Image (cartoon, rainbow, N blue to C red):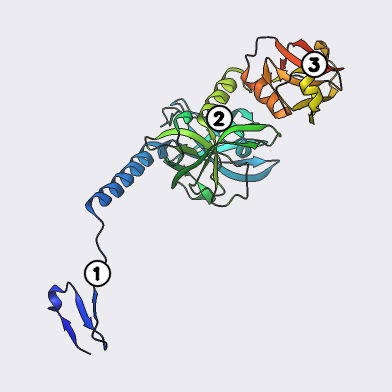
């Protein structure tokens, strides 16, 4: 076998002739194109800048529940005065909380308000002039967009993971059974202790809060969108709770017979059947009865109890609502003054 080689000090290639006389040239791996290197450098710079901007606002949270040491989680400061956001799952039921800042300072943490329906909580740290994160607009997110998560998984402080927005508009149930709308699904790595960490875009703006609702998800991250987060914050700061209207009914979904759909010119094949009316509730005052089928709320079609919950959370709190029902093969509009809980 004949082998020809260049000078070893300036080796660029090796040409080997095999027994069949075929030339086989082996070259070192090609270097990335200059444009590719620049793109990778730009990606790295974006992540580094975001981490330097946002990570000082991330705090590690720990506390006690029922006189026993609880688990840990994360949160992030949203004002220089010490207001912060975390998961309801992290703070719910705890007697006290302790926060550790990125600089290692330990501070007392007050739970201002807790909303299990969205797995969010508003906190206040006993400190001032803190670094804080800027809230962004989750409505501007696009599938495939770069996102970054920062937190303290498994007690490992200032851990950063990156990923992409995998899907938008997901829905999942909170721990109280209500649907949380417009959940962001992403591919950034999330682990125990990462509950309550901010999900940020490439400009360092918070577009979501990672939720602990799906405990066993592998390779999947889910975040409550910043639009919902800001609404919850405003409700808790103003009222120390999230106000939600309620009708005071127990209900389930039923199929409406096609003949009745045609007879009443309905725009849905499903309705919400009232199974029980709570004594003294807004539904009682409005004359809603067990056996009624609710087909619309304030002019909007409803086909499930989730639809009613969604609309009640969206409609103004200070206005009477019109509930359209089917009773004895007739359509009736009832005015309801839905109270808040």
Q: Can you tell which quarter of the image residue 277 is in?
A: top right
Residue 122 is left or right of residue 48, and the answer is right
Taking 310 as reference, is 259 left or right? right
> Where's residue 74, x and y in %?
53, 40
Q: Earlier in the sequence, mark 2 or mark 3?
A: 2
Spatial CA span between label 2 and label 3: 35 Å
Label annotation for residue 142? none
Q: Is residue 146 above or below residue 317?
A: below
Q: Nearer the viewer, mark 2 or mark 3?
A: 3
Q: Which residue is mark 3?
A: 283
Asked if the residue at tag 1 contacts the one at tag 2, i.e. Cβ–Cβ closer than 8 Å, the answer is no
| Residue on which the image places disc 1 | 28
Q: In the image, residue 189 lies at what x, y percent?
A: 50, 49
Which of the 4 quarters of the picture holds residue 276? top right
In depth, the one of 261 and 317 nearer the eye is 261
Residue at the disc numbered 2: 123
The quadrant holding residue 73 is: top right
Label 2: which secondary element: strand
Q: Looking at the image, is mark 2 or mark 1 nearer the viewer? A: 1
| Residue 44 showing in the rendered view | yes
């Amino acid at each position: 076998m004949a082998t020809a080689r260049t000078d070893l000090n300036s080796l660029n290639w090796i040409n080997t002739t095999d027994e069949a006389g075929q030339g086989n040239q082996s070259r070192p791996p090609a270097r990335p194109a200059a444009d590719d290197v620049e793109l990778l450098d730009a990606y790295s710079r974006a992540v580094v800048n975001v981490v330097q901007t946002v990570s000082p606002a991330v705090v590690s949270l720990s506390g006690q529940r029922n006189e026993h040491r609880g688990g840990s989680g994360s949160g992030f400061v949203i004002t220089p005065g010490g207001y912060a956001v975390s998961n309801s799952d992290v703070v719910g039921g705890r007697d006290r909380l302790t926060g550790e800042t990125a600089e290692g300072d330990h501070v007392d943490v007050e739970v201002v308000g807790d909303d299990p329906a969205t797995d969010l909580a508003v906190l206040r740290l006993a400190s001032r002039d803190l670094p804080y994160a800027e809230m962004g607009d989750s409505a501007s997110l696009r599938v495939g967009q770069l996102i970054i998560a920062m937190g303290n998984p498994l007690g490992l402080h200032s851990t950063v993971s990156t990923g992409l927005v995998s899907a938008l508009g997901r829905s999942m149930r909170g721990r109280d059974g209500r649907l949380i709308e417009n959940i962001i699904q992403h591919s950034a790595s999330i682990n125990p202790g990462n509950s309550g960490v901010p999900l940020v875009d490439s400009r360092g703006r918070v577009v979501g809060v990672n939720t602990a609702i799906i405990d066993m998800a592998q390779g999947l991250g889910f975040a409550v969108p910043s639009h919902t987060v800001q609404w919850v914050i405003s409700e808790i700061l103003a009222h120390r709770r999230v106000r939600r209207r309620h009708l005071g009914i127990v209900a389930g979904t039923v199929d409406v017979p096609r003949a009745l759909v045609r007879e009443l010119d309905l725009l849905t094949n499903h309705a919400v059947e009232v199974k029980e009316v709570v004594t003294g509730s807004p539904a009682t005052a409005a004359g809603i009865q067990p056996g009624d089928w609710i087909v619309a709320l304030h002019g909007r079609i409803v086909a499930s109890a989730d639809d009613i919950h969604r609309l009640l959370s969206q409609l103004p709190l200070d206005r009477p609502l019109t509930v359209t029902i089917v009773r004895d093969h007739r359509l009736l509009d009832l005015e309801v003054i839905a109270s808040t809980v």
